[in-house]
Image: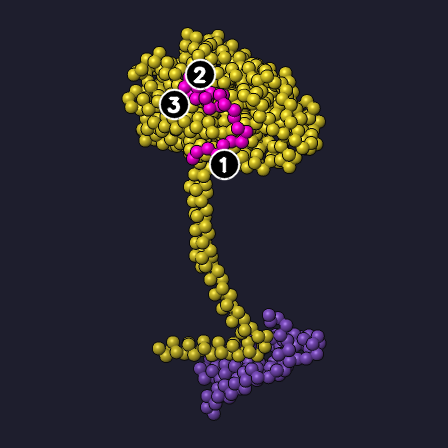
Amino acid sequence: MNPVNYLYLAALLFTIGATGVLIRRNAIVIFMCVELMLNACNLAFVTFSRMHGNLDGQIIAFFTMVVAAAEVVVGLAIIVTIFRSRHSASVDDAGLLKL
Amino acid sequence: MENLIGTLVLVPLLGAGVLLCGGRRLDRAGHWIGTFAAALSFVIGVVLFADMLGRSGEDRELAATVFSWVPVGGFRADVGFQLDQLSMTFVLLITGVGSLIHLYSVGYMAHDERRRRFFGYLNLFLAAMLLLVLADNYLLLYVGWEGVGLASYLLIGFWQHKPSAATAAKKAFLVNRVGDMGLSIAIMLMFTTFGTFAFGPVLENADKAGEGRLTAIGLLLLLAACGKSAQVPLQSWLGDAMEGPTPVSALIHAATMVTAGVYLITRSGAIFDGAPDAQTAVVTVGAVTLLFGAIVGCAKDDIKKALAGSTMSQIGYMVLAAGLGPIGYPFAIMHLVTHGFFKAGLFLGAGSVMHAMNDEVDMRRYGGLRRYMPITFVTFGLGYLAIIGFPGLSGFFSKDKIIEAAFAKGGTEGWILGGAALLGAAITAYYMTRVMLLTFFGEKRWQPAPSPEEPGAEPAAETRGEGRMPHPHESPKVMTIPMIVLAAGSVLAGGLFSLNDAFLTWLEPVTGHEEGHSPVTAVQVTTATLVVLFVGVALAWAQYGRRPVPVTAPPGSLPVRIARRDLLQDDINHIVLVRGGEHLTRSLVYVDHTLVDGVVNGTAAAVGGLSGRMRRLQNGFARSYAVSMFGGAAVLIAATLLMRAV
């Protein structure tokens, strides 16, 4: 199978993720969309690694996974705290820092 | 002996310190402490004088360096004293007349609750004035110069509860500041020219400096002298300075401080000798001022202001003489000393009269006082005869010499200066006779005391009785004794000085002396002086002696009204300086507001407006920030791709 198809898939996933980040209000959903974008990138990296015949892309994919895991921990902690204090996970409600 | 010089300054300085810091517990004895300090200083002066007389003319000069004041690299400023014949003359005049006036003030200020402070200021003045004449360099002289200015300010404004006194003090201080600026710039110029400002090196090397430099220094020194000695164009403060207590007018604004300018010019003789243009400026200032002061003196009804005009005029004589160079220096100083005696005596007499007349100063409300105040009348009368130059009294000898010296200048200049001096002598005779006639002769023109709303120096309880008539009485002994001593000085000093040219021989090692080539003989000058003297007295007699004097001044013709307004000195200052300054500041403020503030405020407004709009972007919706991030990333990627493509 032509590896370029994977790139199309990655682009599609990324777009879905980005659209989700931009249009959804629920923080958890936005978070999942961010994960979707990260994994789209991973897919693209792995695909490029395959296409170019070296391991750089796969190594970067591992790095991305590690970073994503750390980010999930911190991000979820923030979201849970916000939810506890505000009883809502809507990102539009958390606008206290604006002028 | 050298060590004693410092104590001359130190004693009154300590007196001032004790009196001003001692607090109220010294209130009862303060005046005697002050008088004692002045007298002690005088005794030290006399001891030094006796010691100086014991040595021959050339090595009479004493010098003492007390400590190094500002040693910075090549710059050295020492606190050092120099006592030569010129300084000695001043020391004796300052401490002698100063002690007498301290004594007089004990009586004059007896009812003032701030008397201790008054004596503290007087002692401070003595210390500063002695520092001025004893300094051996211009920088230390400047310290004394500022010190007397400060003391003068404090004493003019001594009755600070009167707004007029406070204003007069401020005026004196400000006008003096203009002159002081001249002195400080002159000292800086000296330092750049000679590398030092000690009298010795500066004056010895004066002929080596260029004439332009010397002229500049000379003119700046003249500016300084004009400020301190109330010479035209910086004369306007002296008349108002009469708001101070009368002993202050006698000591500071007649006998000593105002002559500091003459001292400065005489001391800097070598500089002026090398700068004929500066000398011409000096004699011009002197001649103009001697007429200016005399004319103002004629028009004033306030006895102290008439005497102030006279002081200005007499100092004009001294400055004129000092500007003539070595022909005139000794006579300038001689007139200064005799003037110190008779003018201090006249002022003390005026103070005595005011004391007796409920602090009335208008001479038109005096009259006939000679029967009530015989001692004041006689002492004032002797001072009067001395100042108009009656033969045999002090003023005759000193003024006559100055007129002679003015003629001896030679050429047209000599005739003009001599003529001005003669004319001044006539006017002097006129206005002093007027003062004399208005005060002591004629019928009584006394008026009831000023009503209580007039803020007088006397306690209100006494003056409350509406229409209290004055009861003139002779002043207490503590006031009359100084007047008698000064009157004796006014009678004798001139004759003693002229005996065998004693004063000339005394001062010659310091100031030098040369005989001028006069186009007229001494006898002719003396005759002319006596003739104008007689004319002046006769005119005054015809106007004020023969017929009764109105109590309120007649409106007078235009010239009289101008003279009453001090020849428009304040109006001219107001128009030229105050209005000019106002216009300058207004235009500067306008430029500041429109241009400078416009740029600054415009920038601020632009930034503010822009930020106000930019702020809308921060709307608090995380998703809109996400949009901008995506947009930004998209733009970056697009730009990168575009660059690649190109």
The purple-tinted chain is: A
Q: Residues within 10 Å of mark 1 (few under 14, many from 20)?
A: some
Q: How many numbered circles are shown?
A: 3
Q: Is residue B175 left or right of residue B162?
A: left
Chain letter tied to yellow: B
Tell me the mark number nearer the camera, choosing from 3 and 1: 3
Q: Give residue B174's mark.
A: 1
- Between B415 and B439, the one nearer to me in the picture: B439
Give B30 or B451, whichever is nearer the viewer: B451
Instruction: Give the residue pinned by disc 2.
Output: B389
Real-space Cα separation, disc 3 to disc 2, in angstroms: 13 Å
The one of B59 and B122 positioned closer to us in this rendering:
B122
Q: Amino acid at mark 1?
A: Leu
Q: Is residue B554 part of the magenta span, yes or no?
A: yes
- Between circles 2 and 1, the one closer to the viewer is 2
Label 2 element class: loop
Q: Residue at x 57, y 79 (%)?
A: B623
Residue B333: in sight, yes or no?
no
Q: Amino acid at mark 3?
A: Leu
Q: Position of residue B403 (x, y in %)?
A: 37, 18
- Picture coordinates of residue A56 (x, y %)? 49, 77
Q: Is residue B158 magenta?
A: no
Closer to the chain start, of discs 3 and 2, is 2
- 3 and 2 marks on the same chain: yes
Which circle's residue, 3 or 1, is located before the other in the chain?
1
